Image (cartoon, rainbow, N blue to C red):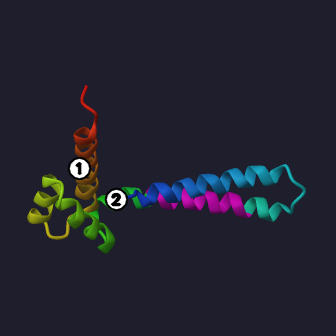
Amino acid sequence: MARRLYHKGTLIAVAGAISLAIAVGLAFLPVADYWILAFLMLGLLLIMFGIRWEMTADIRTVSGPALTHLHWLARFCPRAAELLEREPIPLWRDAFQVDAACRKRGRDNNAPRH
């Protein structure tokens, strides 16, 4: 199965939402208030950090594993090959667009013909 490029900020924000859900669940149990407060603070901090990560990810260059993924993708998708020719180390913004386009192209090519 092929690797994917993930929005790490979104995953961090989801972890924050899970932490908030745990805090709400703990509110109905006989536990100390500081545990509830700790999970609330952790959840809010994770959500804020995840949003910040997503807002600044577009202007950073891709990581090593993502670059390896793009090189692998370039074997099958001309858009990825074009991106790597144009920029040896592309930005996350471009990598996400190319990854989505190549996946859509792969799904369209593998769709059954009726």
**Mark on residue 28?**
none
Read off the residue under disc 1.
Answer: 102
- Residue 109 horizontal/vertical position (percent): 22, 41
Disc nearest the viewer among 1 and 2: 2
Instruction: Please check the rendered image and state whether residue 39 is part of the magenta-colored stretch, yes or no.
Output: yes
Residue 10 falls within the magenta-colored stretch: no
Label whose residue precedes the other's in the sequence (1 or 2)? 2
Residue 27's x, y, as percent?
81, 51
Determine crowd level at label 2: few under 14, some 14-19, many 20+ residues with C-alpha closer than 10 A.
few
Which residues, given as a range, are shown in magenta? 38-51
Image quarter in which the N terminus is found: bottom left
- Please, what is the three-letter code of the amino acid marked with disc 2? Ala
The residue tagged 2 is 2
The reply to whether residue 28 is in sight is yes
Q: What residue lies at 69% left-to-right and 50% top-to-bottom?
A: 21
Which is nearer the eye, 24 or 73?
73
Position of residue 26 measured from the top left corner of the image (x, y, whole percent) = 80, 54
Q: Is residue 61 visible?
A: no
Residue appearing at x 27%, y 43% in the figure: 104
